[in-house]
Image: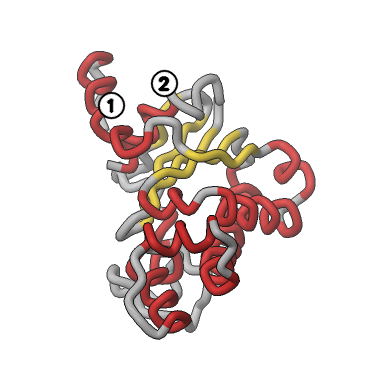
Amino acid sequence: DAKLMCLAEHKLGRAKGALNALCLTLGTGVGGGIIAEGELYRGSDNAAGEVGHMPINSGGRRCNCGGRGCLEAYVGNRRIESEARKVFKRPVSLEELSHLANVRDRRALGVWRKAGKDLGVALCGVVNLLNPERIVIGGGVAQAGKVLFDKIKETVSQQAMGVQARRVRIVKSKLGKDAGLIGAAVMVREGLRI
């Protein structure tokens, strides 16, 4: 689904016109797709783009994949909801957490800023390694909007290498929840394989 989202955003969305881009879906998991020199990059085993399983803390939290310290263990929706539950002392959905952040609740802002910083740190590595023009972020977690994106951008600006940090634009997905379906239609129309 992340590769399909990437294909859709590259052909019709916010990565359109970019020769080099990374697209992320932030939901239960963290999926990714890479556009390299205008083409979807698949890797040797069609497994490229697993940004969610990049370790950001070698002794960190256990991830669903069996690894430790993966990005997904810090910014997947379950982890963010768990952090919100600790802060609010009750269950809080992502939708409510986003609403509370929009009305400037300091606790909600803190949860989103922490998630944005964790994601930004991981993206610094990607930005330094791949030097993309654009990073497109979609999925349920991306609905947090400005508070999340501002912290991601700030972190990348401060911690990534200068040339790469100045080049990259980090934007919210244009195609939203339909990006995967649109990508599947593009794949069929253009006779591509994923």
Q: Considering the numbered disc 2 on the image, is that residue within a helix, a strand or a loop?
A: helix
Residue drawn at (37%, 57%) of the image? 95
Nearer to us in this view, 24 or 84? 84
> On the rendered image, what quadrant is the C terminus found in?
top left
Q: Considering the numbered disc 1 on the image, is that residue within a helix, a strand or a loop?
A: helix
Residue 92 tag number: none
Question: What residue does disc 1 label?
Answer: 182
x then y, percent, for residue 7: 37, 29
x then y, percent, for residue 89: 40, 85
Q: Residue furthest right?
A: 162
Residue drawn at (28%, 26%) of the image? 182
x then y, percent, for residue 135: 54, 40
Q: Is residue 108 above or below residue 128?
A: below
Q: Earlier in the sequence, mark 2 or mark 1?
A: 2
x then y, percent, for residue 2: 33, 42
Nearer to us in this view, 131 or 97? 97
Is 41 situated left or right of 56 in this image?
left
Which amino acid type corresponds to the residue marked 2 in the rendered image? Answer: Leu
Nearer to us in this view, 79 or 99? 99
Question: What residue does disc 2 label?
Answer: 12
Q: Is the C-beta separation of discs 2 and 1 under 8 Å? A: yes
Nearer to us in this view, 189 or 75? 75
Which amino acid type corresponds to the residue marked 1 in the rendered image? Answer: Ile
Is 35 situated left or right of 110 in this image?
left
Q: Is residue 139 above or below residue 58?
A: above
Q: Is residue 29 above or below residue 23?
A: below
